[in-house]
Amino acid sequence: MLINCVAYQEGKKLCDVPIRQISDYVRRPDCFVWVALKDAEPAELAQMQDEFDLHELAVEDAQHGHQRPKIEEYGDSLFAVVHTVEMIDGELIVGELDIFVQENYILSIRNRSQQGFLGVRARCEHEPELLKQGSAFVFYALMDAVVDRYFPILDAIETELELVEEQIFSKGSERANIERLYQLKRKVTVLKHAVTPLMEAVSKLYGGRVPRVCANMQEYFRDVYDHLYRINTSIDAIRDTITTAIQVNLSMVTIDESEVNKRLAAWAAIFAVATAFFGAWGMNFENMPELKWKYGYPVSVGIVAVVCGYLYYRFKKSGWL
């Protein structure tokens, strides 16, 4: 679905362009066309391929989707895949932004994402001095917008992790804590898969040999890399914290089980003593004078009670009961 198709010249909006006339504006040396699509159909991609003369391998990747974040060169043009990550009802939804860039055009295709980029277009149009740089500035603005949207998700994950950490030492919440920690670990992994490959790809857009279309925007792409580096560092720290929290939670479960085992062992020892006494007196041997003694029964019960009481006292004092 077509969202916008606009031509820009000297940093200012020139006009909305019909799709059939895109190639006419692309051929102008001081003009570039910005086309935005959402969930593009194969017919739309084929039409854009004809108008922009896109490389067939890049079009194939955009059509199939589910690509790893990357930036590839095809002659004088670039093809970038960026993952969009949105949190909806506590779940992370991963979309994809495919970007085709050359000096005279930029084509962005948004897939499986509810968040649009109209704000990026407005930002670019309000900065004509930077928009004069052409499609490279739009390319930077799109990537910067996607990366900036990672920060709120990271903050939400950190907040949820703090809430779980507060519950770790609460009795009876061990299973729920482990489930929540593993859910957080899965979310962090999703974000990690979006950030790490993109950070590697963006590092090729500044310093050393860079694609010609990005040559004048190296400082801006370095800024995007810095943001990705900060996010990646935070993700690693969160993953370490989650791993530690899981280990602590499992240790708490082990400690609780140990406490239960100690109580069971203490009671077993107490009842074992009583069983031993009553087992000896219950054998009914002929030469057991206490069996015929008038006070034999209360004395034997008293002995068992005293011994069991002493054991209970010792176990209680040692913390086993």
Image: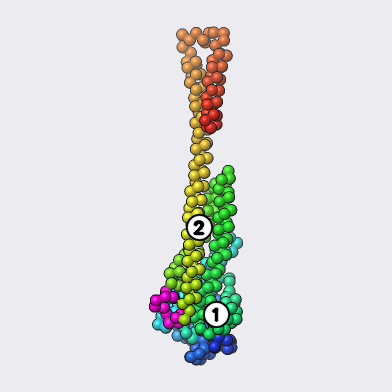
Instruction: Indicate the position of residue 77 as horizontal and vertical percent values.
Output: 44, 82
Whether residue 211 is in magenta: the answer is yes
The residue drawn where x is 53% and y is 85% is 132
Q: CA distance from mark 2 to mark 1?
A: 35 Å
Q: Quadrant of residue 2?
A: bottom right
For disc 2, the neighbor class at 10 Å (few under 14, some 14 to 19, many from 20) is: some
Q: Quadrant of residue 170?
A: top right
What residue is pinned by disc 1?
36
Q: Nearer the viewer, residue 47 or 194?
A: 194
Mark 2–mark 1 CB contact (< 8 Å)? no
Q: Amino acid at mark 1?
A: Ala
Q: Magenta stretch: give its range.
A: 204-215
Local SS, label 2: helix
For disc 1, the neighbor class at 10 Å (few under 14, some 14 to 19, many from 20) is: many
Which of the image's four quarters has the N terminus? bottom right
Q: Amino acid at mark 2?
A: Ile
Q: Nearer the viewer, mark 2 or mark 1?
A: 2
Instruction: Indicate the position of residue 210 as horizontal and vertical percent values.
Output: 41, 78
Q: Nearer the viewer, residue 100 or 57?
A: 100
Above or below for 41 versus 281:
below
Say which label, 2 or 1, has the lower sequence index: 1
Local SS, label 1: strand
Say how many tags the image has: 2
Above or below for 88 versus 5:
above
Which of the image's four quarters has the C terminus? top right
The residue drawn where x is 48% and y is 64% is 232
The residue drawn where x is 57% and y is 84% is 128
What residue is pinned by disc 2?
238
Instruction: Indicate the position of residue 145 as horizontal and vertical percent values.
Output: 55, 73
The residue drawn where x is 55% and y is 59% is 157
Instruction: Indicate the position of residue 188 as horizontal and vertical percent values.
Output: 50, 60
